[in-house]
Amino acid sequence: MHVDAYRLGSHVEFDDLDLDSDLDTSVTVVEWGEGRAEGLSEEPLYVRIAPKDHGDVRQLTLDGSGDHWAAVIDALRGWS
């Protein structure tokens, strides 16, 4: 599931999507979800993509909570 949260006008519209009903069986990606999506999961993974220096280079930052995401992030360290 993919949601562009910035397109939603209110928390009510976000809640109406009922995103938490399928969390056990699917991956839910919420763009621009700060202030709206924090309650979807007890162990979310936050992915931030930001421009780095100039040109087409981007910096990817992963920030997860819980043992699962800590292990995933640890396994990915050193990739470039």
Image (cartoon, rainbow, N blue to C red):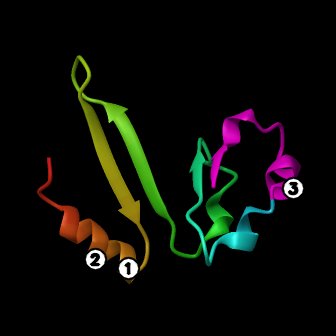
Q: Is residue 52 left or right of residue 14?
A: left
- Local SS, label 3: helix
- Local SS, label 1: helix
Quadrant where the N terminus sits is bottom right
Which residue is tagged 3?
16
Outermost residue to the bottom: 67
Q: Residue at x 69, y 71 (%)?
A: 22
x, y percent for residue 9? 83, 37
x, y percent for residue 70? 32, 74
Amino acid type, mark 1: His
Q: What is the number of the mark on residue 59?
A: none
Amino acid type, mark 2: Ala
Q: Which residues are magenta?
A: 1-17
Question: In the rendered image of this protein, does residue 28 appear above or below residue 80?
Answer: below
Tell which of 20 and 59 is nearer to you.
20
Which residue is tagged 2?
71
**For mark 1, does the 10 Å Cα neighbourhood hold few (<14), some (14 to 19), or many (20 or more) residues?**
few
| Residues at marks 1 and 2, CA–CA distance in whole angstroms | 5 Å
Amino acid type, mark 3: Asp
Which residue is tagged 1?
68
Q: Is residue 57 magenta?
A: no
- The answer to whether marks 1 and 2 mark residues whose Cβ atoms lie closer than 8 Å is yes
| Residues at marks 3 and 1, CA–CA distance in whole angstroms | 29 Å
Sequence-wise, the earlier of marks 3 and 1 is 3
